[in-house]
Amino acid sequence: MFYKEQLKGNSYEGKTLSFTFDDGPGETMGDQTGPKTVRIAQYLYEEEISATFFCVGSTILKYPDVLDSISYYGHTIGNHTYTHINMVKGLANGEDILSEVSQTTQLIQKYSPEHIMFRAPWGQWSPEVADYLNDTIANASSYVGPFYWDIDGSDWSYWLKNKSAEECAIRYLADILHEDKGIVLMHDSSADNITAKNNNLCYETIKILVPLLKKLGFKFISLKDFYIRK
Ligand SMILES: [Zn+2]
């Protein structure tokens, strides 16, 4: 079901993190900057870390094969609406927020037949949106979320300013050390800013961050393992 309050990682054990990647999928040829969803998924698999990719439905259609790879590498594919809509404003303006969720569910359901993990774009959420979806959507009980976050290093703001993966990784490391545990928000693409998308260095940032976090004794758990299989 959709909870009125968004879920965070505040009940995690110390030094435990969940990686989440929003606004993808996306792919870029070679080593140039840009979204690299499959390489993030493969790298984390090799590091024995299971993450959650909250994908935008309309973007999934542009990269239909990427979801197979995300799933093959043991990650969860979550629902991040069909067009990256603000759910609170959408409900107030009479937009079809129901199909924003259900259309993306149709695209990802085969990878996660029992549970659909949901994150609201920009974390925009209200009890009224939760009530509306629980009352109207098919199989409301199969949804889990929305998932908020505890650690947000604003990776996109680094790509807007054409900054390096090292600078972004340092910011995330500082924020993680400050919070100690929780759900980490990153973006493997951008839903609404072409500069942030084209300059994306999420894959490069993750490759710097993970070895440092492991050395510092951090553990990793997927949202599914914590919230569903616990
Ligand atoms: Zn988003």
Image (tube, rainbow, N blue to C red):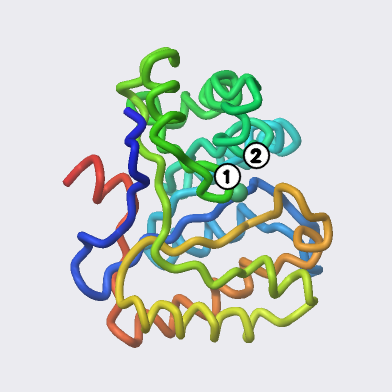
Residue farthest to the front? 92
Q: SS of the residue at dot 2? A: loop
Residue tagged by mark 1?
121
**Does any atom of ligand 1 lie closer than 8 Å to the CB of label 1?**
yes
Q: Position of residue 97 (x, y in %)?
A: 58, 24
**Does any atom of ligand 1 lie closer than 8 Å to the CB of label 2?**
yes
Determine whether, in the image, residue 41 is placed left or right of residue 188: left
Q: Nearer the viewer, residue 93 or 208?
A: 93
Residue tagged by mark 2?
84
Q: SS of the residue at dot 1? A: helix
Discs 2, 1 touching: Cβ within 8 Å? yes
Q: Is residue 71 visible?
A: no
Q: Position of residue 220 (x, y in %)?
A: 32, 65
Earlier along the polypeptide chain: callout 2 or callout 1? 2
The residue at the point 44 percent across, 64 percent down is 184
Q: Which of the image's four quarters has the N terminus?
A: top left
Q: Nearer the viewer, residue 227 or 209?
A: 227
The residue at the point 57 percent across, 50 percent down is 122
